Image (cartoon, rainbow, N blue to C red):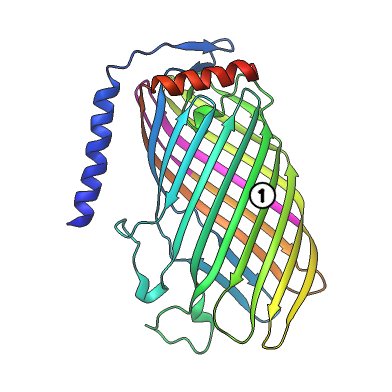
Amino acid sequence: MRLNRKILALILFLINSICYSQIVDSIRIKTEENYIEKMNNQLALDISFNNSYEIFEVKTTNNKVILYPNTPTNLRLNLNYRFISFGFQFTPDFLPGNGDEEMKGKTKSFELGTSLIFKHWFVDASYSKVKGYYLYNSQDFNTFLPGDPYFQFPDLHYTGLNIASGYTSNSKFSLRSLATQTERQLKSVGSFIPVFNLRYYTIDDKSAGTSTQKSNNIETSVGPGYAYTFVFKENFYLSLGLSGSIGYLNSKITTRLVSESVITKQDNFIVRWEGKTGIGYNGDRFYMGLYANLLGTQYAQQNTTVINFDTRVSYHLFFGVRLKPPNYLNKKVNKIEEKLNI
């Protein structure tokens, strides 16, 4: 009953928002030979569901360890206006698939994110925290019996800060139409998109064991990418994107023993790849879409036979409406755009 009431409340909110948005006046601005329609006088608000999470996989000569958080479905709220976007993500128990803590343990997670998307340049930044993982391949170990709960690591903490900056070479291509829905792509077009990534993250075992570890990691990578948006009847679209990058990972590993802490450092060459696809509807008053993303990083640890994988596989299902923005927000953003000449 609690699930039905919460989902019903979200549906009613969206319906009321859509009805309200029908009275909002729309000033359509088409640019770049009618390839892009700007939605400058509308505030885009969306709710989405995804399974975006960090997976850690470590392979040695004899063993393989795959760690998952118990976060099957995340809920995300986004507020987008012109060139700026803010989002907040968390994992409520009432969503289907969440809350199976007896078998997989308890996971707490949240993420904050923001995006700045200009005509050519863009910047994405996010901060996330996760507490609690379980061993996805527990059945590979002799001590695991059928029906047993997965081996759990409730005090394993992940904290990450990610910044990505890139450049879209084709001014007829609208990244906003895919990422924040503050524009509409009216004609099919593609763009070359090189991206630079900077990532800092920690993995910390805070359990009460006699030997625990914490790793501090700084990762940088750069590489090319390409995206193409197929537009059908102006409102429907299909998007495809591929990218690859090479980079550098510096890790500081602290092993906490009973009497002392041992620090080791590693420098590793990394390879990263990413594939994206999505379908959606981007109308005058409301929009929706379903995206899929595969992101992976692989590197061999320095002076060892260990190979690390950091893989993120995710879908993103979203529903959104466009509303009339508050006057103060409109004035503030106008001033910023005038100063930045955008």
Observer-nearest residue: 100 or 339?
A: 339
Q: Position of residue 220 (x, y in %)?
A: 74, 50
Element class at badge 1: strand
Quarter holding residue 256: bottom right
Instruction: Indicate whether residue 282 is drawn in magenta.
Output: yes
Report the residue at 41% width, 70% height from top. 106
Report the residue at 56% width, 50% height from top. 127
Of the 4 image quadrants, the one containing the C terminus is top right
5 in relation to 266, above or below: above
Observer-nearest residue: 54 or 254?
A: 254
Of the 4 image quadrants, the one containing the N terminus is bottom left
Observer-nearest residue: 101 or 34?
A: 101
Q: Position of residue 251 (x, y in %)?
A: 74, 64
Q: Position of residue 79 (x, y in %)?
A: 43, 34
Q: Is residue 63 left or right of residue 151?
A: right
Q: Is residue 84 visible?
A: yes
Report the residue at 50% width, 34% height from top. 85
210 in relation to 95, above or below: below
Direction left: furthest residue:
1
Q: Is residue 298 left or right of residue 38?
A: right
Disc 1 packing (10 Å; few <14; some 14–19; many ≥20): some
Q: Position of residue 22 (x, y in %)?
A: 27, 19
What main secondary structure does the magenta stretch of the protein show?
A: strand
44 in relation to 41, above or below: below
Q: Which residue is mark 1?
A: 273
81 in relation to 208, above or below: above
Q: Which residues are magenta?
A: 270-291
Identified by mark 1, the residue type is Trp
Instruction: Indicate whether residue 171 is drawn in magenta.
Output: no
Report the residue at 45% width, 46% height from top. 88
